[in-house]
């Protein structure tokens, strides 16, 4: 079970409790063990973290608080080497640029919706895995540049990648993400046993392939990508081998009906 360590700093008790409750709901949904530390001002939080040296997966910071502001607290945390994910929670929208300067992963306005919390926590998990086990994370995640910002892609969620002029579009199970890089450069960073060229302008994630047709690959949920004649025979053979292996495993040693190769 993954242990999620979170810190919340807000001078208003209502909003501190709101974040704690949303995190608890998320942790219960995902089956995580949650531990939260709560402060009502930035000075106390910074001093406590300096003294303990404790690293958090995420810190939720109010911007406007008595004493030092949330921005000042974030700058001090970065100065002392805290590389944790920071999310600013505020009633105002005028601090977004400053949030970018301290490399915050999110900037959201109160009241927080649960759907926003889930999106934030998905980012938090990716960044936390990077920090905890970089070697393993580099196999699962890909760091790309999108709209002048660094974005981490969960490769397990990538269905296929499409070339569009000078861009690459990652078609994922939950969203699309545009990257300003060539398809060739992207492919060099991927596991070639998992991500396969299926067309001059398309790379597919083999585990997501549901059906291989002469002119296209089907991934399920209505997602399709074109398949070139050059790649058809080898991809169909590999796909059918996988299907037959799964059938054999499901029958636990009994003689399966084998799918015939075209």
Image (cartoon, rainbow, N blue to C red):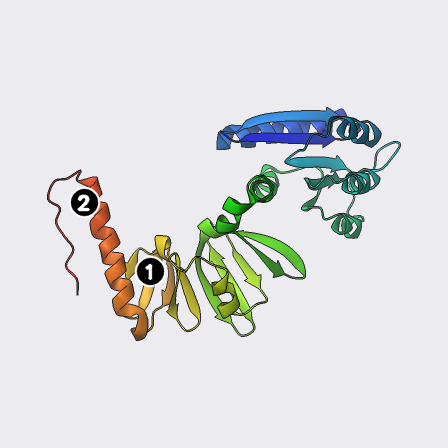
Residue at 57 percent of width and 40 percent of height: 118
Q: Left or right: where does residue 146 sit relative to residue 110?
A: left
User: Label 2 crowding class (10 Å Cα cut-off): few <14, some 14-19, many 20+?
Assistant: some
Q: Of all residues shown, which one is farthest toward the front?
A: 135
- Percent coordinates x, y for residue 204 in the rendering: 40, 61
Residue 108 place in picture, x, y as percent:
70, 43
Count all numbered tags in the image, as a single digit. 2
Which numbered marker is on residue 66? none
Return the residue nearer the eye: 28 or 51. Answer: 51
Report the residue at 26% width, 63% height from top: 236
**Label 2: which secondary element:** helix
Q: From what the image shows, is residue 154 above or below residue 55?
A: below
Q: Look at mark 1 in the image and give the residue it sits on.
A: 218
- The residue that disc 2 covers is 248
User: Residue most toward the right?
Assistant: 67
Residue lying at the far left in this picture: please name it: 255
Q: Is residue 219 left or right of residue 152?
A: left
In the rendered image, residue 262, in percent from the top left (x then y), is placed at 17, 65
Residue 238 visible within the image:
yes
Answer with left or right where residue 220 lies relative to residue 151: left
Are discs 1 and 2 less than 8 Å apart at CB? no
Instruction: Locate residue 192: give its quadrant.
Output: bottom left
Which is nearer the eye, 32 or 95? Answer: 32
Q: Using a 10 Å C-alpha cutoff, classify the residue at mark 1 as few (fewer than 14 neighbours), some (14 to 19) or many (20 or more).
A: some
- Of pointers 1 and 2, the one earlier in the residue sequence: 1
Residue nearer the viewer, 23 or 115: 23
Tag 1, which secondary structure? strand
**In front: 50, or 6?**
50
């Amino acid at each position: 079970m993954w242990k999620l360590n979170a810190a919340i700093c807000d001078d208003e008790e209502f909003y501190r409790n709101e974040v704690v409750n949303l995190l608890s709901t998320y942790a219960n949904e995902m089956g995580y063990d949650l531990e939260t530390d709560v402060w009502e001002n930035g000075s106390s939080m910074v001093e406590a973290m300096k003294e303990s040296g404790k690293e958090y997966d995420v810190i939720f910071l109010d911007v406007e608080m008595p004493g030092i502001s949330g921005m000042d607290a974030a700058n001090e945390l970065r100065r002392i080497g805290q590389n944790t994910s920071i999310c600013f929670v505020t009633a105002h929208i005028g601090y977004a640029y400053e949030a970018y300067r301290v490399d915050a992963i999110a900037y959201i306005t109160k009241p927080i919706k649960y759907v926003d919390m889930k999106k934030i926590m998905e980012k938090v998990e990716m960044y936390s895995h990077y920090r905890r086990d970089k070697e393993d994370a580099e196999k699962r995640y890909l760091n790309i540049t999108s709209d002048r910002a660094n974005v981490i892609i969960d490769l397990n969620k990538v269905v296929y990648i499409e070339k569009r002029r000078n861009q690459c579009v990652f078609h994922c199970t939950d969203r699309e993400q545009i990257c300003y890089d060539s398809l060739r450069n992207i492919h060099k960073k991927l596991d070639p046993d998992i991500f396969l060229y299926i067309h001059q302008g398309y790379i597919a994630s083999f585990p997501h392939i549901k059906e291989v047709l002469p002119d296209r690959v089907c991934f399920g949920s209505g997602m399709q990508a074109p398949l070139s004649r050059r790649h058809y025979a080898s991809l169909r053979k590999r796909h059918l081998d996988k299907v037959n292996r799964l059938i054999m495993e499901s029958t636990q040693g009994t003689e399966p009906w084998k799918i015939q190769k075209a």
